[in-house]
Image (cartoon, coloured by chain):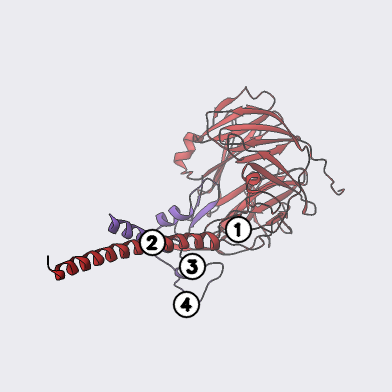
Chain colours: A red, B purple
Amino acid sequence: MPNGYWQVILCIQLYSLFTNMRRYLYLLILSVLAFITLLTIFHFGEIPNKHKNGFKRNYFSSAWLKERQLDLQDTLAGIIGSTRSTIYAGTSTRGEILEIGKDSPNTTKRIKLPYFEQYYDSLGFNSLSVIIDSPAIYLFGENKPAILKTTLDGARCEIRILPPGPFTREAIAGNDCIILRKFDLSVTDQSFVRYNFSTGLLKKEENISEIFGDGGIVSDGQLYFDDATKKLLYIYFYKNLLLSFDTVLNTVKKFSSIDTVSSFKMQTGVVKNGGIKAYTNITPADLVNKVNNVHDGLLFNMSALKADNETDGFFYNNSILDVIDLKDGRYLGSIYFPTVNGNKLSRFIVSDKRLIALYKNSIVTYKINLNLDRKPQ
Amino acid sequence: MKKLLSVAAIAVVFALGSAFTKTGEQWWNVNNPRVGTPAITWLTMTQVKLIYCPGVDNVECASLISNPIMIVKKP
């Protein structure tokens, strides 16, 4: 075989090897780039609880004793009322509630909401909230807007259509006195109003809410009435602000939850589709104050933020409630409850020194003993 | 096969890059409006709901200000 032929073969082999190596090299570079991209995203991305949140928690010792746990087939949506002996829980079945005995949880009764079928369609209650203030049941047609007041046996039924503008949060603050967070067209935001169910009178707040003009999205939160102090409390979802005010709606005290999120991280904006224009959040909605309840001048607040003295394992395997004194906004301490069947609590109420916690398919009752060091009234 | 892997790797890099790119410039930021940014972008409600409205937290996730005014809350 001539020498030149071997040289040609060698060149072809070398070229082939080089070409294949180049392909592998490209693949390697791309993989490394993809890995670096992922690392960069993880490092600089705003992942909740990845960095320190700038606060610490103290825990009450021996703060609770588990009394009973009731496991159900139903998916539980929320606690919509309670009396001394009964808890009412909403289920995922529309128009149906569960009546559960506090001391005898085996006496669970399934109740169809009176007038629900009749009015749900005819009034177009496409966003319905239910509060049981025994013996009354209030059905709030938030987008209608309308309020229907009835009783568990359905013997009485009254309905009120409110002035235009939906509402999103409701609290019963005494006989026929309802406080709503209602849309105000003049500022394209929501503010608090007092509605008298008997007279139909509606009174607007005076300088309580911050106005952002985004339909009330960024300032969304939870509204409660504390019977002990006769005060309303509004807890922001997206920053650490708490508003405490009375039913006259003209003065407000501002407190903060334990964390350090004093300004909104979430941003809101306008989207348009055809003729429909809507406000919504345009960055992820990172909750600060997730689930809460008010009782006897105390706020029990489950924050979405991990304290700097908590490990990831402890934070994700417990539902941690911060207790705040509503007289002066002082943080008193925290209670932690272990997850039930892998779930953190989704809603809870506190009444008669008991905390009734709702999990996805369970209700657990805890007797609580906080040994609080509270300032006198 | 190698070509396919290369293309897939490139696609992953680009997809990740575009998914996490901040889109703030395209929006009208209500909290902090910037002069010169377009007031309204033509994103559909479905796109917004898919990105920002998942979950069951009972929070308000959209406020439709067309007639009638309507507020969308998560379950």
- Choose top left, top right, bottom left or bottom right for residue A6: bottom left
Alpha-carbon distance for marks 3 and 2? Answer: 34 Å
Looking at this view, name the residue that lies furthest to the left. Answer: A1
Observer-side mark, 1 or 2, equals 2
Residue pictured at 62% horizontal, 50% vertical: A304
Q: Under tag 1, what secondary structure?
A: loop
Q: Under tag 3, what secondary structure?
A: helix
Alpha-carbon distance for marks 4 and 2? Answer: 43 Å
As rendered, which of A332 and A313 lies closer to the eye? A313
Please report, as a chain letter, where disc 1 is located: A
The answer to whether residue A275 of the structure is visible from this angle is: no
Mark 2 highlights which residue? A28
Badges 1 and 3: C-beta atoms under 8 Å apart?
A: no
Badges 4 and 3: C-beta atoms under 8 Å apart?
A: no
Q: Earlier in the sequence, mark 1 or mark 2?
A: 2
Observer-side mark, 4 or 3, equals 3
Horizontal and vertical percent position of residue A27 = 35, 61
Residue B24's disc is 3
For the residues beneath circles 4 and 3, the answer to whether they share a chain is yes
Alpha-carbon distance for marks 1 and 4? Answer: 26 Å
Alpha-carbon distance for marks 1 and 3? Answer: 20 Å
Label 1 is placed on what type of residue?
A: Ser
Q: Under tag 4, what secondary structure?
A: loop
Horizontal and vertical percent position of residue A371 = 83, 40
Mark 4 highlights which residue? B36
Label 4 is placed on what type of residue?
A: Gly
